[in-house]
Amino acid sequence: MVPDDRQALLDAMMDADAYIFATPIYSHSPAGFLKAILDRICGPFTDATFVDTVVQMRKAGDPHFAHMKVDERVLKPRVAGFIAIGGSSTPDQITMALPILHTLIYPMHVKVVDQVVFQTCGTPGSIIARAQGSFVERATQLGKNVASQIGKSFDDASYLGDEPEGACPYCHLAKVDMFYGTENKIGCVSCGAQGVLKVDPDGIIRPVWNKNCGVSSITWAGKKLHVGDIHKESAAETFDIQNCTGFDLKRQQWREVAVPLVELPSQRAYCML
Ligand SMILES: Cc1cc2nc3c(=O)[nH]c(=O)nc-3n(C[C@H](O)[C@H](O)[C@H](O)COP(=O)(O)O)c2cc1C
């Protein structure tokens, strides 16, 4: 592992009562630097349901959890807001910006209270001048919205951002995964909530999201479900490894596999005619 600023950033995140993540959009997504930082700090490293389970089991006197090291600072209630900024003007260029921001912090059970994408701001400084200054006003409002919810628990903090038509009730985005089948089942790309597509009397197809579905990773129940799934699968992985004949030899063979070198087209002499 390369030495880095992980501990300092983790401490700063644990000290904070609120986060505002602001990122340029690169390739329809948040900046890779931001993702790399959060990949090293969030996910299983700061999973609130895991920390909570360990704390509860210790209180109950379960010896299996006695020596497990967890960071109880994770359990402090926190709120967040997201700002993503892109140069494009069309919806196809920003698709994964907000969903990925959600996936980066949902394990900490942080309540996202506002989120916004600003487009047509590709030139440095242009955000101040675009849309008659309304983008900066909206960003200011986002800051106020986040500040207004600081100190509230996940359930008590209110979502104050925009609600697009057909939005999932958990992440407030309308990003749909299609599972087809006779029931027209759908999933939320950002948080995994489930629902169905229904044709309304006006002929328009709309999503109907399950309330309290207990599957969305944004909910406590959804996170617990995921942690349970990972524990079950890792036990099955260990079992398969232990019962795989010649596992060590097979792994060594894969590590030593010789990939034949071939001449690539770019290495050949280029002929214009
Ligand atoms: C590599 C790269 C990829 C980009 N991809 C997108 C994109 O998918 N959608 C979009 O709206 N803007 C895109 N942009 C424009 C940037 O979002 C915009 O210029 C950005 O806000 C500039 O921020 P920066 O100066 O901090 O890099 C891209 C810019 C770069 C350099």
Image (spheres, helix red, strand yellow):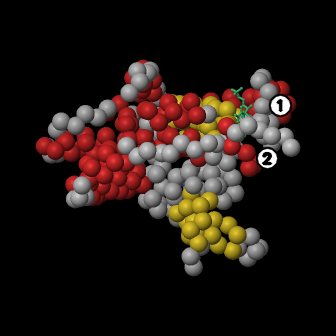
Q: Give coordinates of residue 150: x percent, y percent.
A: 50, 32
Ligand 1: image quarter: top right
For marks 1 and 2, give the one nearer the viewer: 2
Q: Is mark 1 on a helix, strand or loop?
A: helix
**Along the viewing direction, whichever of 180 and 260 lies nearer the viewer:** 260
Work out whether residue 228 can be spotted: no
Q: Which quarter of the rendered picture does the C terminus lie within? A: top right
Residue to which mark 2 is pinned: 90
Viewed as shown, does residue 11 lie left or right of 27? left
Residue to which mark 1 is pinned: 130
* Three-letter residue code for mark 2: Thr
* Residue under the point 45% across and 27% down: 13
Viewed as shown, does residue 257 lie left or right of 67? right
**Along the viewing direction, whichever of 146 and 11 lies nearer the viewer:** 11
Q: Give coordinates of residue 88: x percent, y percent.
A: 78, 40
* Three-letter residue code for mark 1: Arg
* Residues packed near mark 1 inside 10 Å, few (<14), some (14 to 19) or many (20 plus): some
**Along the viewing direction, whichever of 256 and 71 lies nearer the viewer:** 256
Compared with 228, 83 (above or below) is: above
Q: Give coordinates of residue 69: x percent, y percent.
A: 25, 33
Which of the numbered marks, if any, corresponds to residue 62? none
